[in-house]
Image (cartoon, rainbow, N blue to C red):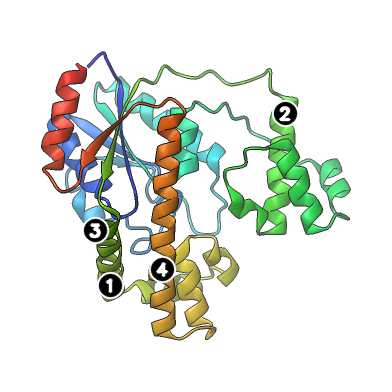
């Protein structure tokens, strides 16, 4: 398969990415690399949609690798991805990237060159007196095309983001080596109305599986409400419910609506990815997705 050395499976939430990645792994002697920013955490199972039972005998990577509370970031992800990618290739298997978080996927497909940035006490001291809006402005000046806006919501994360952006700028000429990655990118597309149905159905299934109880258990084990807020929509809204801020029905309705909005943002990101030069092979979700994917792979070889 010299035309490509990695397959990337993209699509909106609830589009069926994991299922297709596993099916392709069976046919192509592949292994799945998750590009989900929440699936790295142990204990975030139902809310992050790990669906580990789908993998069965198929090896997977970057799932359940850190404990809740650790601030796993894009630098961690890129390093872990490159390790997994090299390991899979060394064993002459096919890496299949299942996205995932847009920022994480972008960092691989666009080849972001990231460096490890230690804490900078002098910089932190200079940032300490600044108001929140001033910090946001400083980060925006360093990174005009800011992707991860969640960093702007929390002061500590915001200062760390400025610290990282400053360090990257100072070491722009000292970038790490980057392997040759030739991705074959496929994205599963459904009509928006069907996506909405699939999202709602999946949310109710996860609630029946114990999603609320999972969030309660995470908090009981020491994960703060504030940390849970940063683990995505499911954890944020259910944390608000468990704190007594919203009742159960409102929680479910607001969460369902928020996931629908998130799916729209994912669609926008995919279109932008394509406009920016990435070749995406679109798969019709209403037809046999696996057959379509194998047809694309056959033509690409």
- Mark nearest the camera among 1 and 4 is 4
Q: Residues within 10 Å of mark 2 (few under 14, many from 20)?
A: few
Secondary structure under the numbered disc 1 in the rendered image: helix
Separation of residues labelled 2 and 4 (CA atoms) = 39 Å
Task: Point out the tag, 4 or 3, that comes first from the N-terminus.
Answer: 3
Residue located at (50% from left, 26% from top): 111
Contact between labelled residues 2 and 3, with CB atoms less than 8 Å apart = no
* 110 versus 16 height, above or below: above
Left or right: 132 with respect to 25? right
Separation of residues labelled 1 and 2 (CA atoms) = 45 Å
Residue closest to the eye, 138 or 128: 138
Residue on which the image places disc 2: 169
Task: Point out the tag, 1 or 4, that comes first from the N-terminus.
Answer: 1
Quadrant of the frame with the N terminus: top left
Quadrant of the frame with the C terminus: top left
Contact between labelled residues 4 and 2, with CB atoms less than 8 Å apart = no
Separation of residues labelled 1 and 4 (CA atoms) = 13 Å
Secondary structure under the numbered disc 2 in the rendered image: helix
- Mark nearest the camera among 3 and 2 is 3
From the top left corner, tell me how far across and down residue 99 is, in percent. Answer: 36, 42
Q: Residues within 10 Å of mark 3 (few under 14, many from 20)?
A: some
Q: Residue 257: which disc?
A: 4
Task: Point out the tag, 1 or 3, that comes first from the N-terminus.
Answer: 3
Separation of residues labelled 4 and 3 (CA atoms) = 14 Å
Residue closest to the eye, 275 or 230: 275
Residue located at (68% from left, 37% from top): 143
Residue on which the image places disc 1: 204
Residue closest to the eye, 97 or 67: 97
- Mark nearest the camera among 2 and 4 is 4
């Amino acid at each position: 398969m010299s035309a490509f050395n990695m397959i990337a499976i993209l699509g909106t939430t609830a589009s069926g990415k994991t299922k297709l990645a596993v099916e392709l792994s069976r046919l192509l002697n592949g292994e799945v690399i998750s590009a989900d920013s929440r699936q790295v955490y142990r204990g975030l199972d139902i809310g992050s949609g790990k669906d580990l039972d789908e993998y069965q005998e198929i090896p997977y990577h970057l799932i359940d690798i850190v404990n809740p509370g650790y601030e796993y970031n894009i630098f961690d992800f890129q390093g872990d991805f490159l390790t997994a990618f090299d390991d899979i290739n060394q064993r002459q298997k096919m890496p299949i990237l299942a996205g995932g978080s847009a920022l994480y996927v972008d960092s691989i497909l666009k080849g972001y060159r990231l460096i490890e940035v230690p804490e900078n006490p002098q910089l932190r001291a200079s940032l300490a007196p600044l108001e929140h809006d001033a910090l946001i402005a400083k980060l925006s000046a360093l990174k005009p095309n800011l992707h991860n806006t969640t960093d702007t919501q929390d002061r500590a994360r915001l200062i760390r983001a400025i610290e990282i952006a400053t360090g990257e700028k100072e070491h722009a000429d000292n970038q790490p080596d980057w392997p040759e990655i030739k991705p074959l990118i496929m994205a599963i597309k459904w009509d928006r109305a069907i996506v909405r149905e699939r999202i709602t159905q999946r949310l109710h299934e996860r609630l029946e599986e114990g999603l609320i109880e999972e969030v309660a258990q995470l908090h009981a084990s020491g994960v703060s409400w504030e940390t849970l807020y940063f683990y995505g929509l499911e954890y944020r809204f259910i944390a608000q419910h468990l704190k007594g801020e919203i009742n159960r029905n409102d929680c479910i309705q607001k969460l369902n609506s928020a996931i629908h909005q998130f799916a729209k943002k994912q669609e926008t990101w995919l279109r932008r990815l394509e406009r920016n030069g990435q070749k995406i092979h679109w798969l019709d979700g209403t037809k046999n997705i696996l057959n379509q994917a194998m047809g694309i792979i056959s033509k690409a070889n």
